[in-house]
Image (cartoon, rainbow, N blue to C red):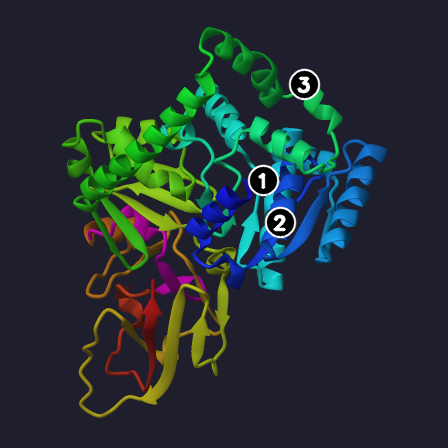
């Protein structure tokens, strides 16, 4: 087992003797055997233990046991105490999911802080089979069916090639002691029900069930590679990215045989779920304007595209006051450079849309920069009657997504400039103008 373990580590990391490993050790048989294998291999490692404070004295006993294990191998020991029940309640998670999230978050922070190359988790082949059935019962795609990955980012699982029985046999042969988690004996958790009842029943039906399921998992993992390649190729032809926005062609989606499959596989990394993707596909032939939100991203249905973009930070929605002597304005989205100049003789106004040149004498300070609002009106340059900003943006063929990042410059209660598009006719440079107020957009998203 030691030789096979070292072969697995080498296949994952290349040169394990040159790496630093952070081992997640609970005190159970899997993680204790893993620590023993690392110790015998003389790799550089530390032991990290999570005390979830769920089993009272038993949890504290696990911590003391793991600390003694670190002392035995003469390696650094790290421990973290969690209020797992409180975290589960506050985030509306099951206790198991709360513990999982807390563990991985802390391990990642610790590895980064202390310069470890890899976080090592002691999942075995039986864990992968149990995860296969958990995901199957919840409804999942190919990624869920191939179970636990041997590597993900800097997390590795070198015991995945070994069954629980192989690990138990090794522990008994080497006279390794471990801690039994009393919760593993109950049927309180879904995983335990599968472990105690479903797997034994499958083995009654087919003695080689575990081996056959592992073979299926490997087949699914290979199938997923081809599946992902096909998804990427198709989506690559109907997607274009620019200015921090991704445009997904509606017409391109309509031509796909199963658009919801392609769209979900592309969007799930942005936090969108199956239900939302189904709603998007149902809206393919509907009116523009529908918006879909994940925790960090927004998708707006435009006339020709689904437009994907990161949600702006709260900083971008603040109003900004401009004093007379301000020369630079930055609000996280907009960057303006401002100059006040005497009007040159023979001056003829001509500026690109990125420059707002206004009659300084008509402005009422402090000015305000804010996002445009429904009901806003102004007199577009060249017009002698007001127009709604919303109608102006429609006439200018501004996309729905871009409309949400339009700002206006306000003087008193009047809009003097729809920033980056058109100044108000009342603030244009005329014969009576003495000074120019020039606002130049340096960078706008």
Q: Earlier in the sequence, mark 2 or mark 1?
A: 2
Q: Say if the magenta span includes residue 413.
A: yes
Residue at 36% x, 24% y is 216
C-beta proximity under 8 Å, tags 2 and 1: yes
Residue 391 visible in the displayed image: no
Q: Is residue 134 left or right of residue 355?
A: right
- Please give the range of residues in magenta: 397-416
Check the image and report above or below for 264 versus 428.
above
C-beta proximity under 8 Å, tags 1 and 3: no
Residue 122 is labelled as 1
Residue 219 lies, in percent from the top left, at 33, 29
Q: Earlier in the sequence, mark 1 or mark 3?
A: 1
Residue 108 lies, in percent from the top left, at 58, 52
Quarter of image, res 61 = top right
Q: Earlier in the sequence, mark 2 or mark 3?
A: 2
* Mark-to-mark CA distance, 2 and 1: 8 Å
Q: Say which of 371 and 349 sits in front.
A: 371
The residue where tag 2 is placed is 23
């Amino acid at each position: 087992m030691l030789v096979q373990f070292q072969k697995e580590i080498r296949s994952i990391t290349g040169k394990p003797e040159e790496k630093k490993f952070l081992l997640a050790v609970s005190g159970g048989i899997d993680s204790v055997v893993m620590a023993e294998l690392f110790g015998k291999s003389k790799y550089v490692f530390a032991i990290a233990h999570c005390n979830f404070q769920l089993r009272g004295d038993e949890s504290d006993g696990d911590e003391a046991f793991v600390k003694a294990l670190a002392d035995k191998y003469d390696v650094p020991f790290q421990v973290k105490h969690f209020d797992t029940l409180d975290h589960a309640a506050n985030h509306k998670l099951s206790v198991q999911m709360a513990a999982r999230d807390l563990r991985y978050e802390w391990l990642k922070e610790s590895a980064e802080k202390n310069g470890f190359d890899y976080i090592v988790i002691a999942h075995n082949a039986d864990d992968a089979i149990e995860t296969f059935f958990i995901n199957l019962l919840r409804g999942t795609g190919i990624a869920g069916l191939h179970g636990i990955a041997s590597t993900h980012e800097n997390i590795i699982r070198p015991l995945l090639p070994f069954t629980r029985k192989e690990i138990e046999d090794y522990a008994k042969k080497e006279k390794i002691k471990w801690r039994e988690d009393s919760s593993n004996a109950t049927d309180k958790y879904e995983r335990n029900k599968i472990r105690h009842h479903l797997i034994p029943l499958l083995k009654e039906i087919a003695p080689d069930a575990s081996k056959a399921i592992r073979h299926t998992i490997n087949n699914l993992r290979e199938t997923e590679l081809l599946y992902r390649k096909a998804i990427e190729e198709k989506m690559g032809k109907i997607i274009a990215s620019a200015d921090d926005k991704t445009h997904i062609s509606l017409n391109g989606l309509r031509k796909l045989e199963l658009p919801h499959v392609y769209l979900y596989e592309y969007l799930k990394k942005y936090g969108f779920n199956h239900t939302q993707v189904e709603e998007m596909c149902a809206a393919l032939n509907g009116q523009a304007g529908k918006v879909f939100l994940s925790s960090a991203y927004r998708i707006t249905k435009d006339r020709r595209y689904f437009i994907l973009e990161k949600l702006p930070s709260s900083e971008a929605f603040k109003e900004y006051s401009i004093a007379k002597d301000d020369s630079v304005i930055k609000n996280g989205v907009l960057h303006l450079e401002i100059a006040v100049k005497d009007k040159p003789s023979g001056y003829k106004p001509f500026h690109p849309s990125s420059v707002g040149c206004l009659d300084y004498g008509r402005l009422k300070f402090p000015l305000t920069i804010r996002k445009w609002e429904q009901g806003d009106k102004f007199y577009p340059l060249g017009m002698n009657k007001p127009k709604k900003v919303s109608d102006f943006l429609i006439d200018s063929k501004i996309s729905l997504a871009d409309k949400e990042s339009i700002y206006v410059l306000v003087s008193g209660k009047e809009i003097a400039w729809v920033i980056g598009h058109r100044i108000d006719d009342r603030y244009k440079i005329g014969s009576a103008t003495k000074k120019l107020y020039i606002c130049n957009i340096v960078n706008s998203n």
